Amino acid sequence: MPSSDISPSDARRAAPALAIDQAEAVLVEHYPRLVRLGYLILPPSLGRHRRVLGAHAVAQRALPRGRSAEETPPVLPAQRAGGTAPAPAPATDAGYALLRLRVVRAALAAQRPVRFAGREFGWPPRAPLPLSLPRVWGLRLFPRAGEPEEVALDQRLGALSATARAAYALRRIDELSPAEIRLLLAGAGEPEQRIEAAMAAADAVESEAPLVDPCALQARPTDLLRRRQRTRTALVGAVAVAVVGCGFAVFPDGWGPDGAAAPPYSENAAAQAALDPASLRRMPADAWRQAARTDFSVWPARGSALDDTGLLRRALAVWARPGDEVRVSATPGTQTGPPPGPAQLLFAGEVGGISVVLLHDGLRLVRYAEPTGAREGEVVLDLARVDGAGLSGASAVVVQRGDGNTRYLLAPWVTEAASADLLVPGRPAAELPVDEHGVSGPLHSARQDGACTEVPALHLTADGAAGSGGAESGGPLLLADLGELTPALLTRGAPGVAGDGGSVAATREAWGPLACQLASIGGAGVRSVNAWEFAEQSLPEDGGTARWVCGRAETWRGTGARVWTQFLDPSHEEDDGAVKTAAAEDVPSCGERQPAVLSGMLWRSQDAGWFLLAAGSEEVVEIAAGGAVTGRGEGRTVALPAEEGAQARLTATLADGGELAMLGD
């Protein structure tokens, strides 16, 4: 249904009333699904404990009052039956649709400002938790720790509006179509303009990572010492009330000395020593000049808050025991446990109104961030694996993001910093200021709405005394922010020689047509990305000479490399004629171990003729096509006449007699 046809009245078309006992049976049957729906819609700012309770609350409150439910849901399928499983009975469908509507409406209403006399007020906030249920005393509940992809998805959804989260949840959980989602959101009271904006934002989230399960929970005690202190304070207050006749019981609030950390569960001398700020290792300013290695282990401690014991203690405690007010993220393959011993302090100071602590334990970088001067609220803990980092991998760390900008803490061997737009390789890089603590000025962050109008990159120059030759020698570096703690190194050239002798200008020129693809590999723990032009092809009907490029993103963990190929059409160079033709993950293609690659696509000439184009790397001596397009040709490229929409399978013969399938097959 087109969005212009949706109205709240349309979304409340008549359906038979639902008996209360029938509604209860449906609620019990679909309870985990409804709780997960409520959890995804409720805001992460509630904290994991309150968000879990809120999700269970809105699901339980969805049960209508009275002997029958007079409210009618939008007329749309409750869920899609997969495979050959039988579809639910009609009554169950209507019952689930009603409960789902009530859950979505309650979860959205919990985030709307209070209205009074026609005006909106942000305080007091609506409470998603009813007074009667559920209630938990002495415990904090939160979902089990998920995979890094699950955490990254939850963080990305947290940046969306409540309506957009609802649209995404309905699409993922119940597999509703866009028209069905619009109809349901309209039935929940959302205005049409907000629905359209939410649909666009939800469509931009393409991740299929597992969803958080708010029914599979972990339990931890609340702060026992603080609870005991509150009990004593309450008793003192009660005595004061009895003596004076009136008074107030004052309860301590805000963070304790350990900040937003959870209470300790056990005492261990070695573990406690690692959490003592006095035990943090601090390197001298010039240690990197005499060291045999050039990585994070030789970074000096910098920042304006190196002596702020309270800040350092909170950072260490939260790292060891993140509480429910801590937003934790970790790149794939990164362990999130406490430090195995005293960590190395890299930075402690204020950046853009945020107090930041950067730590290194030999394998991981850890970034702790809290609002400067705050005594309560959400804090951030980011972890990233960086073992084996060399000069290029240890030259910059994200220290703060905000207002569409990113600031970096630069390595002590960096002598110059500049910003560049990869989409405009001919534009000179702009100098980036660096303060006395090594923190760079703001660099534009890549847009998160899917638009590719600018791809910022960090251009660094390293001291010639750093490194030991080759790609790790002192010299220029080009880095791209992929949404992680460390930016990824951008290189160009054939596998095994990428980065050797190439200038930053040549690397920017190579990445110009490919830069928009960088957004698709963010959050994967990427260490470096190489662009390799593996073939040129003369196009039929005087179409010019096209180029075939392979991109390969290597990860810090060594597995999960992302590989893709692109076709650069010479007739569309002004409007970015790069077409992604194939992609695969965790394959050796375009890498040092197996450089050979084969790719292909359907191409339409300026004379409206369709062709199957294929190209391979220098190891390829013959290419064959099967399926709707058949034929073969000697050499590294082939162009075969084809029909629009034809499906074909490509294989290549290698010089050593081996066979190579198309990338992604």
Image (spheres, grey):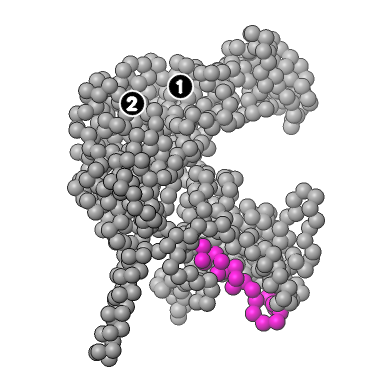
Query: Helix or strand or loop: what does disc 1 sit on?
Result: strand
Q: In x, y percent, where is residue 121?
A: 41, 73
Quadrant in which the C terminus is drawn: top right
Query: Height in image: 237 above or below 479?
Result: below
Residue at image coords 19%, 38%? 436
Residue placed furthest toward the top: 656
How many neighbours does mark 1 have within 10 angstroms: few (below 14), some (14-19), or many (20 or more)?
many
Circle 2: residue type: Leu
Number of numbered discs: 2
Along the horizontal axis of the image, is 390 left or right of 522? left
Q: Nearer the viewer, residue 6 or 69?
A: 69
Query: Within the image, what quadrant is residue 34 found in?
Result: bottom right
Answer yes or no: is residue 433 visible: yes
Q: Position of residue 491 (x, y in %)?
A: 43, 24
Q: Would you say 47 lies left or right of 621 here?
A: left
In terms of secondary structure, where does tag 2 sit?
Answer: loop
Specify start and end residues of the magenta stretch as a single range. 52-74
Mark 2 vs mark 1: which is more N-terminal?
2
Residue 421 makes an appearance in the image: no
The residue pinned by badge 2 equals 391
* Residue 18 placement (x, y as % from top left): 73, 75
Task: Identify the residue under disc 1.
Answer: 492
